[in-house]
Image (spheres, helix red, strand yellow):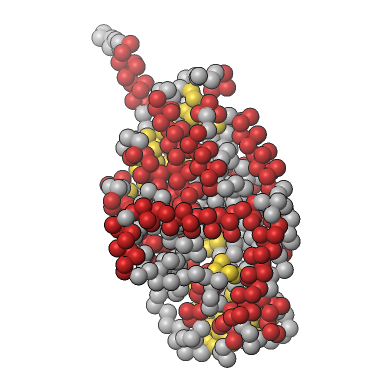
Amino acid sequence: MNIAITKPEQVSVQRTRAISPDHEVVIVGAGISGLGIAIRLKEQGIESFIILERADRVGGTWRDNRYPGIAVDITSFTYSYSFEQNPNWSRVFAPGKELQHYTERVAAKYFLYPHIQFKTSVSRAEFDEERHYWRIEVDGGDTITARHLVSATGGLISPKMPDIEGINDFKGKIIHTGHWDDSIDLKGKRVAVIGTGATAVQLLPEIAPLVKRLDVYQRTPIWLLKKPDHALPGWLKSSFRLLPAAQRLVRVGTDVISESLMVISTIYYRQAPWLVRKCEEAGIRNMKEQLPSRPDLWEKLTPKYGFGCKRPSFSNEYFRIFARDNTDLITTSIERITEKGIKTRDGVERKIDVLILATGYRVFEKGNLPSYDVVGRKSQEIGAFWESNRYQAYEGLTVPGFPNFYVMLGPYALIGTSYFKMAEGNAIHAVRCIKEGLKRQATCVEVRQDVHDRYFADIQRRQQSTVFLNHNCSLSNSYYFDKHGDAPMLRPSTSVEMLWRAKHLSMNNYKFSKVGSNPSTDKLTR
C-alpha cells in the first residue's frame, strides 16, 4: 500500500492557499467615495482590488439623479476632489450632468475601469473568523472573497416613499425625484409635488413655467440663502487651465465660506449663536425679496426650527414661484391620495395628472447604510447592531467586531461642506489601515473597543454644542436625525481637523493579528 507523505512546506502552501482571498480589497460602489478610495489604493501601490457596482456606469448619486434643475448646492470649486480640480465647470454651482461627466473622466484618468465589475449587486457580506477574510455574495449566487471590504454605497440610494394612505390608488403618473422618468412630458399637466427640501428647491422653478397647475405640499419649510451662481467666463477657465494654483486659491476661499455657513455655525452653535442668527436673517431677507407681493405667505415659508437643523440650501428663484398664478402652496396636512388627486384634512380634493415625490431618501436606517447585510464576529449584523446600540463608528469609518471593514459614509462621518472631503479623509484613513496590515503581515485589522468607546463619548460631548440639540430641531423633520434621536449624519468637527486626524491618528488604535492568533491577546506593536 502506498502512503502519500506530505512535507511540512506543502502543508504551509496548502494552508496559505486556503486563507488567500480573491482580492486584497473589494469596494462596493463606484460613486464619489468608491472612486476616491480606489485612487488612494493605487497611489499607495495596492492594485489587488475590485469595485462592485450595481449599475452600468460610475457616478453614484450624480448618475441616478436626473430631475430637472439638479445641481450642486456647494460651489464646484469645493465640491470636487482636492487632487483633481476641474477648470472647465460651466457655472459656480455646476449642473448635475457635469458632475456625472467629472466622475467618468476621473475614473478613466486614474485607470479605474479595469477594476470595476458593473451590473453586480451585493446582497450579503460575512466575515470568516477562521480565515480572516470577507465572503461577499452577489446577485446570481456567486461569492467573492476579500481580505478587506469597503462599503462605499453612499447615503442617497434608497428613495423614501411617503407613508400616505391611498398612494397606490392614484391612477395618474407617480415619479420619485430619485428615479426621474425622462419620458414624461409635464407641459400643460396638473402637477402636485410633495416635499419642499433641497431637491424641490431645484426642481420647482424648472417645472413651474411648464405646467398648467402646480400644487406644492409643504410639511416643513426650508432655510434658503441667496445663491451666488454665475456662468464662468472663458477667460477664467483658461486661467485655471494655465495656472492651476489660481483655482486652488479660489477653492481655499470657497472652502472658508462654506465651512463658516455649513459647519461652524452648526457644530459651534453654543459658542457662536450669532452666526446662526445672521444666517436666519439672511434667509428671511432672501424670501421677502423674492416674494414681496405675497406677505400672506411669509409666515408659512419661514422655518420654526433653527438654521442648520435641516440641510439648508441656496436659491434665487424658489420663492418666486409662489407668486405665479398657476402655483399654490398647501400647508394643510394630506388625508389621503385618491384615484384622481390629493385630499387634505380640510376636505378639499385637488385633481392632478402627475404626482411628484420629492420626499428624499432613507439614510441612517437598517437596510440602507449599508444597503446589504454585513455580518461580523459572532454573527452580529451591523445594521441590527446600530439599530439596537445607536449609530457609532470610530472616525466614522470602523466598528469593533467588524474587522477589515470600512464604511465610507459611517455614523458621524460627513463633513457639512462637501462629500468629497469626507471621501478623501476616510480613504486616507482606510488605506493607512490596509497598508499597515500588509506591512505587519497581519490578516486582521480591527479598531480597539476602548479607543472606539472614547471616540464615541467625545462625539456625544461635542454634540451638546451643536445646533441639533439646541435650536428647535425636533420641528425640522430632518434626515439628519435617526430613530434614537441622534444626529449621526454630520461629524461635529471642521474638515481641517478631520483630515489631520485621518493622516496622523496612531495605527496602534487598531489590533493587528494573523490567522490562528487570538486577537484578544495581541499586544501593541510599537
Quadrant where the N terminus sits is: top left
- In-image side of 225 versus 84 (left or right): right
Q: Where is residue 194? Give x, y as percent.
A: 59, 74
Establish if 268 lies above or below 500.
below
Residue 463 seen in this snapshot: yes
Q: Where is residue 279? Give x, y as percent.
A: 64, 65
Residue at 43% in and 57% down = 250
Residue at 68% in and 73% down = 302
Establish if 6 lies above or below 203.
above
Quarter holding residue 477: bottom right
List the single residue furthest toward the left: 2
Q: How many marks?
A: 0
Quarter holding residue 523: top right
Q: Where is residue 14? Give x, y as percent.
A: 33, 21
Residue 203 or 370: which is nearer the viewer?
A: 203
Q: Where is residue 497? Give x, y as percent.
A: 55, 42
Residue 359 seen in this snapshot: no
Residue at 41% in and 44% down = 37
